[in-house]
Each structure stands twice: as C-alpha cells, then as structure tokens.
C-alpha cells in the first residue's frame, strides 16, 4: 500500500544510542532504509543535500525522522523548526526521541509542530517494545502523504 | 472727721479683700482687718512696720517705680503683682492697685487681692506643662503637632529635630513637603490625602519616604491622629524611623532570593541526576541486552564492541559522580585563607593538566604580573584548573591553540583573566555556562560541572566571574575577581 518503502533519518549525537536505535529497528522485520547523522548541522546538510550529502538523490530523502533534542552545533529544536518551515520537508513526520521528559521541552517540541514525542525508557526491554510499536504504528498503520518525496 | 473715719474703717474692716494706707516714705498708716489677717500681724505691730519690711527686697525696685509714676501722673495705677511677707516669713502673692488720696500728697491706698490659690494653680499648670514637655521631648519617636485646618506645623519634639536636622523654629516655618522625598506616593499631595483621611475616617498608619535637612532620604512609619490638646483641635503625627526594619526586610528579601536561586540550582541538580545519568545507563542496559543476544546467537565476535560501549558509559557515570562529590564536598572544607601567589597557582594548575596540554600542543602563557591575593590556595588551584580545562576542551578547531593567564585593572580592581583562541561562545550561552551540568556541546568530554565549580570557588572568595567572547570561532576570555581582603 505504500508508494515507497520507509526511509528513516535518525538524528542522534550519542553514538551508542544511535547504535541501539538502529539495532532495535533492524531486529524488527520491516524493510527499511536507515540513515544516521550525529549533529544538527549534519542533519540539515542531509535534508538539503549539501556538502557531503550533495550526491543524495530523491530516493534517499527520508519519509520519517527520529530526532534527539540535545544536539551539538544546532540543537534539535532548531532542526525541527527548519524542517517545519520548509515547504519541501514540512510533510515528513518528525518523531522526537529523547531522554528529556521536561514539560517545557515537550511543550516546545509540539509548538514547533513535532508529530510525536517519545521518551527513551531506561529499561532496554521497554525500549525494544517501544521501537516495535513505533514501527507498527508509523510504518504499518500510519498513512503517509502521497507526495512522499516532497515537493522539492 | 472722726466719725466718718471710724465709719469708713468699720466698712473697710468688713471687706474680704486686704486694704492698706501708706505714706510715700513707707510708713503704714492704716490696715484693714483682711490685710492684717493676710500677713498675720496685729494693728499694734503694724504701727512699727514699714512697707519695705513687709515686702521681699526684690520687689522694692518695682514698687518704687510704680509709686513714682503713680504720684507724678495718675490718680491710680494699673493692677500689678507683687508679694508681701507675713509675720511667719511666708511670701504671699497678691495682685494690687494703688490710688492717690485727695488732699494728702504723700499718702496712697493699696487695694490687694490674694492670689495664692491662683498662683498655686498656675504653678501646677506650668509644672504639668513642663512635665508634658519633658515627655514630649523624651519620646523616642518624632512627634509633630499640626494645625487641623492648614496642616501647618505648630510644634515638634526634640527627636524630630534630631531625626530631620531642623530646629524647632525652622520646623514651624516649613511644610511637610520639605520633609518628604517628593516622589509619588510620597508627595505633599499624598500627605494632604492622608491628613484628610485621618480627619474624616480616624487614625491612619502608613509608611512614608522622608527627607532630612541635608536631603538624605529615609523610611518612617507615620501614625496620624486627630487629638484635642488643651481644648485645641490638633493633628498629631507620631513618626518612627524604620530604616533598620527596612534594611532587615531588604536583607530578608535578598536571602529569600538567594535561597530561591539555590533551590532552582538544586532542582536542576536533581533533574540532571535523573536525566543526564539516564543516558549512559540507557547505553549500558541496551548493550548488555545486545551482548546477551550475541551470546545466544553465538556471535561472540560482536561482544568486544558491546563491552567497550558498556565500559565507556560506565566510565561517564563514574566521572559524573566524582565531580558531583567534588561539588558537594567543596562546601565542607573549611576556607583556609593565606597569601597566595596566583602565578604559582596557575603554574600548578598547568602542571595538573600537563597531559592534555601536551596532547593538544596548547601553548600556555602565564603573565609575570599576576597578583598575590588573600585566598584558599587549594580552591584557587582548582579554579584555575577548571578554567584552563574548559579552554583546552573548546580548542580543537584551532591548529595553533594558545591560552594566556594574566591580570588587568577593571574599574580599578585587579581582575584575572584566562584567554584562549578556541571556538568562542554565543552571547546566548554566556550566562548558562556557569550553571550545573550545562554543556554547550554535548559531545565534549566532562560532566558540565567545571564552570559551575569555578563560579562556586569565586563566590566563596566574594568575587565575581564572567565571560567575554566576540562570538563563535573568535576565542573566549574568562574574567574573575577575588575579594577576601583588599588585594595586595
């Protein structure tokens, strides 16, 4: 039923956390492409196909973004704001995935039009479950827009 | 002549008020019954007395003057007061009048009126007035007496003079306006409003910003009340200096603000413990799970990577806990102040950081002119170490990293600086960087405690610390001052 297969951009500065997210998504049986960038600037380079990501094609554009908030260079809120202010990116669901459960962070993320907000549980089994349910919801049940590749 | 004279004397003897007849030379010609009993002499005794004998010496001059004017000018005198002395030596105050006698040039009548009771009453009154005055002036509050209609100052006590620096006479000539800050709500208009309220609604108590003669402002509490004194309708203002109370209040507010700030820091602290520590814990638990899967899948080659990640995360937790301990212990070491050469302190800090300095080829310069200060040596080493460590940490982009430790005069105060040519910081981050666990760049090593610790040490030395940077990529300079005692 999907126009294209799922491609997830993981924006996460902690390499260990990134590795854990990737591995737990890989053990689910979804046919997905995963991309990982480790700071805010790199995330925007990726999305705007700049610098080292110049050669990316439309087929590499993510249709789902997992975003950490505490990021070097450009923090997660800035990245979120840029995505939601850009015509060609605005439709991509952005799921915040962070250790922070501070009210102000949650409020700010939704104010900047985050599509979902997930808190990393300390218990890793719970995290695996979370990632499975995340996949089930966003990759299976959730209907993505037809203009999956964006207008840009 | 005889009969009429005896008739007149009989008549005079019946009078309640004393009457006597004197010659100008002082001889007593006649006294009536009332006069004799006033002075307690018999008729016979009076025959041998003279005016001067029955009058205290200090009245003589006055009486002679009145008599002189009397004899020369008018048939009778104005009433005047004087005293007589009784047989028992008691002074008796009288109000009297003298009158010439027709056909007898050197004789005159004296009509007296005993004013002993009146005098006693006045004395009592004067005494009570002076008592009132004494209480008025002994009061520890300033007391103003105002005219109800005009608000004019009629009187003020001694304390008022001390409090406001004006004399009583000056106070009577000025208005409330001169005694107020004049800034709303402490203007003359406000004062009149209070007065009106006191007259219409009853006693008023309010705070007031007062001004003394020199123009110094101070806080008072005014109690305003309509009062009747000696039958006069007056307005009484009792004014208390509440400078001390205001100072205490200000101190209290400051203390509360300080505690609230501490509380915010504490909240941040607990938040950090539950969240920043969560991140490495997440890593550890995750990779233990991964390792268990690898083992069950016999994929042993993946184990070293998993264990390496677990070890690194555990190390991060250990680092954070160690530094947390440093911060909490900071307050428990007693401050030990001595003369400390900041030059040797900086050198010691550099030595402690030798390995990372060498690793990154950082050139550290310590100025010769660094001052000798009063301070806690160990803490000052830790301060310099934290500032240097921070500089080294944010240096990596520069191929020729350099740090300079020196001192300058800022507003006349010796100020130490640690200047680097590293990545610099944004204006937005300048204040935050001294907060516990704040890190501009989450990828950097360290716990985010270093600068909070530095700030803490500077504050223990009554100094201040701040940071300046022209922006990202333009280097950073930390400044701090120490104020244990006057710097040498």
Image (cartoon, grey):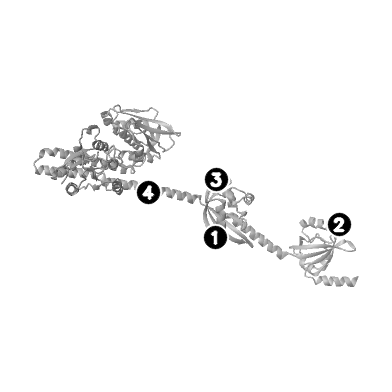
If the image is split into quadrants, where does the N terminus of chain B sit?
bottom right
Residue wearing tag 4: B260
Kindly check if marks 1 and 2 are in contact, taking CB atoms under 8 A apart as contact.
no
Mark 1 element type: loop
Residue wearing tag 3: B216
Q: Disc 1 or disc 2, which is closer to the eye?
A: 1
Q: Chain of mark 4?
A: B
Given residues B172 and B80, the one toward you in this image is B172
Is any part of residue A63 visible from this angle?
A: no
How far apart marks 3 and 2 lie (CA) works out to 64 Å
How far apart marks 4 and 1 lie (CA) works out to 38 Å
Task: Quadrant for residue A59, please give it.
Answer: top left
Q: Residues within 10 Å of mark 3 (few under 14, many from 20)?
A: few
Task: Quadrant for residue B323, please give it.
Answer: top left
Given residues A29 and B267, the one toward you in this image is A29
Residue wearing tag 2: B72
């Amino acid at each position: 039923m999907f126009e294209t297969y799922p491609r997830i951009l993981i924006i996460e500065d902690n390499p260990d956390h990134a590795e854990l997210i990737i591995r737990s998504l890989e053990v689910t049986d979804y046919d997905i492409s995963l991309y990982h960038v480790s700071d805010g600037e790199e995330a925007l380079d990726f999305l705007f196909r700049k610098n080292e990501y110049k050669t990316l094609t439309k087929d590499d554009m993510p249709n789902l973004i997992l975003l950490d908030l505490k990021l070097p260079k450009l923090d997660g809120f800035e990245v979120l704001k840029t995505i939601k202010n850009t015509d060609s990116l605005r439709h991509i669901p952005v799921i915040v995935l962070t250790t922070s459960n501070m009210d102000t962070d949650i409020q700010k993320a939704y104010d900047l039009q985050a599509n979902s907000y997930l808190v990393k549980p300390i218990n890793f089994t719970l995290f695996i479950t979370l990632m499975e349910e995340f996949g089930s919801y966003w990759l299976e049940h959730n209907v993505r827009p037809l203009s999956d590749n964006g207008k840009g | 002549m005889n009969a009429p004279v005896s008739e007149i004397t009989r008549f005079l003897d019946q009078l309640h008020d004393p009457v006597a007849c004197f010659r100008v030379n002082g001889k007593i010609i006649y006294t009536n019954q009332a006069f004799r009993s006033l002075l307690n002499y018999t008729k016979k005794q009076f025959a041998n007395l003279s005016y001067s004998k029955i009058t205290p010496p200090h009245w003589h001059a006055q009486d002679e003057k009145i008599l002189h004017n009397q004899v020369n000018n008018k048939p009778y005198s104005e009433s005047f007061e004087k005293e007589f002395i009784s047989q028992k030596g008691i002074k008796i105050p009288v109000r009297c009048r003298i009158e010439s006698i027709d056909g007898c040039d050197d004789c005159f009548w004296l009509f007296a009126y005993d004013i002993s009771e009146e005098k006693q009453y006045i004395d009592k009154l004067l005494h009570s007035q002076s008592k009132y005055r004494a209480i008025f002036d002994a009061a520890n509050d300033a007391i103003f007496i105002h005219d109800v209609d005009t608000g004019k100052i009629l009187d003020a006590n001694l304390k008022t003079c001390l409090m406001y620096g004006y004399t009583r006479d000056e106070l009577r000539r000025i208005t409330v306006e001169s005694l107020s800050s004049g800034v709303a709500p402490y203007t003359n208009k406000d004062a009149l409003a209070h007065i009106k309220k006191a007259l219409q609604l009853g006693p008023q108590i309010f705070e007031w910003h007062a001004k003394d003669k020199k123009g110094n402002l101070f806080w008072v509490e005014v109690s305003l009340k309509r009062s009747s004194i000696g039958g006069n309708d007056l307005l009484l203002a009792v004014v208390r200096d509440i400078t001390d109370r205001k100072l205490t209040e200000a101190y209290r507010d400051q203390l509360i603000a300080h505690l609230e700030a501490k509380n915010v820091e504490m909240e941040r602290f607990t938040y950090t413990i539950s969240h920043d520590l969560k991140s490495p814990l997440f890593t550890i638990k995750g990779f233990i799970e991964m390792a268990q899967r690898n083992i069950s899948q016999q994929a042993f080659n993946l184990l070293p990577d998993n264990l390496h990640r677990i070890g690194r995360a555990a190390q991060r937790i250990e680092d954070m806990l160690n530094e947390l301990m440093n911060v909490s212990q900071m307050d428990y070491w007693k401050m030990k102040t001595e003369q400390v050469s900041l030059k040797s302190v900086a050198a010691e800090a550099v030595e402690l950081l030798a390995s990372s300095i060498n690793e990154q080829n950082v050139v550290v310069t310590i100025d010769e002119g660094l001052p000798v200060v009063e301070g806690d040596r160990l803490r000052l080493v830790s301060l310099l170490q934290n500032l240097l460590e921070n500089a080294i940490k944010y240096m990596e982009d520069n191929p020729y990293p350099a740090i300079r430790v020196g001192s300058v005069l800022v507003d006349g105060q010796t100020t130490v600086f640690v200047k680097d040519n590293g990545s610099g910081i944004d204006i937005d981050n300048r204040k935050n960087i001294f907060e516990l666990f704040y890190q501009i760049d989450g990828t950097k090593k360290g716990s985010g405690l270093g600068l909070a610790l530095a700030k803490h040490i500077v504050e223990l030395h009554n100094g201040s610390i701040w940071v300046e940077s022209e922006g990202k990529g333009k280097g950073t300079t930390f400044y701090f001052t120490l104020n244990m005692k006057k710097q040498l």
